[in-house]
Amino acid sequence: MDIPRIFNISESAHRIHNPFTPGNLATLGAALRLEPGTRILDLGSGSGEMLCTWARDYGIVGTGVDMSQMFSEQAKRRAEELGVAGQVEFIHGDAAGYVAADKVGVAACLGATWIGGGVAGTIELLAKSLRTGGIILIGEPYWLRLPPTEEAARNCHAGSMADFLVLPELLASFGGLGYDVVEMVLADHEGWDRYEATKWLTMRRWLEANPDDELAEDVRAGLTSEPVRYAAFTREYTGWGVFALMARTLSIWWITNYEPIPLAALPRVR
Ligand code: SAH
């Protein structure tokens, strides 16, 4: 079982497989005010940078599940390197349907919400592992501004314009699912550049070492087109952030006063 090989090639040198910098990850960990000993579940944990650095910096314990064998092995090595192998474990496997045996204080899925069939399904899945009052973390793209055409949206690696929301709509959608947004950390251009541009040198070096590989032509085509595609589309139109959510508990106040903000009342972004 593994993810398509092309990702293991282009992201083999990444520690963080999304547009977050190490600084963004540390900011998020600090923003959540994690108590030492907090248990965290991370679905699609990649190379384990979040769990490993938070174990070192904030004393958390946790489990990551990821379908890439290579990333899972990198995560285990990183845990040893940072001296936190006793605090975090990494499981190589499909995270779809994964529920933790012991309830966790934080349940996360950063940049892999297809695991639960989309944001709503992933929140539902993570909630099954969460203790009462715990925090769900969702890392998700959104439109910084709407691309002018459907073709431009696809060039941002969205299936269509409707695949992503603008930020106010995304935040409102969490409310619609019954969650308060209690924190957020947003990626910036620096983080996007680290995520995307890091692939280019990795691809170039891989091509030189593997000229006869069956994927060499695809990697060559990617290296030729990616810098311009990224600068013209993703960098212009796509944002990314991690949103911290807590379930709204029903109270008499909510039952009598709750009215979702109609999207039509938001400032015109479309
Ligand atoms: N959260 C990590 C990785 C994000 S990239 C980080 O921020 O660095 C998306 C990750 O999802 C990849 O590591 C990929 O291997 C993993 N993945 C994709 N499908 C998966 C599945 N069905 N189950 C578990 N992991 C999956």
Image (spheres, rainbow, N blue to C red):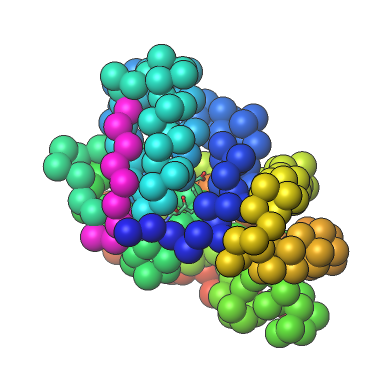
In the rendered image, residue 226, in percent from the top left (x then y), is placed at 77, 63
Q: Does residue 106 sit above or below 117 in this rendering?
A: above
Say which quadrant the N terminus sits in. Answer: bottom left
**Which residue is pictured at 62% across the width and 31% down the height?**
22
Please count the marks in the image.
Answer: 0
| Residue closest to the eye, 215 or 189 | 215
Asked if the stretch drawn in magenta spans residue 55, the answer is no
Asked if the stretch drawn in magenta spans residue 93, the answer is yes
Say which quadrant the C terminus sits in. Answer: bottom right
Q: Is residue 13 visible?
A: yes
Query: Horizontal placement of 69 versus 139: left or right?
Result: left
| Residue closest to the eye, 27 or 205 | 205
Q: Is residue 188 visible?
A: no
Q: Quadrant of residue 222?
A: bottom right
In the rendered image, residue 94, in percent from the top left (x then y), is placed at 30, 57
Furthest residue to the front?
212
Query: Horizontal placement of 245 versus 97: left or right?
Result: right
Range covered by the magenta-colored residues: 88-97
Q: Does residue 166 sit above or below 201 in this rendering?
A: below
**Which residue is pictured at 80% across the width and 80% down the height?**
148
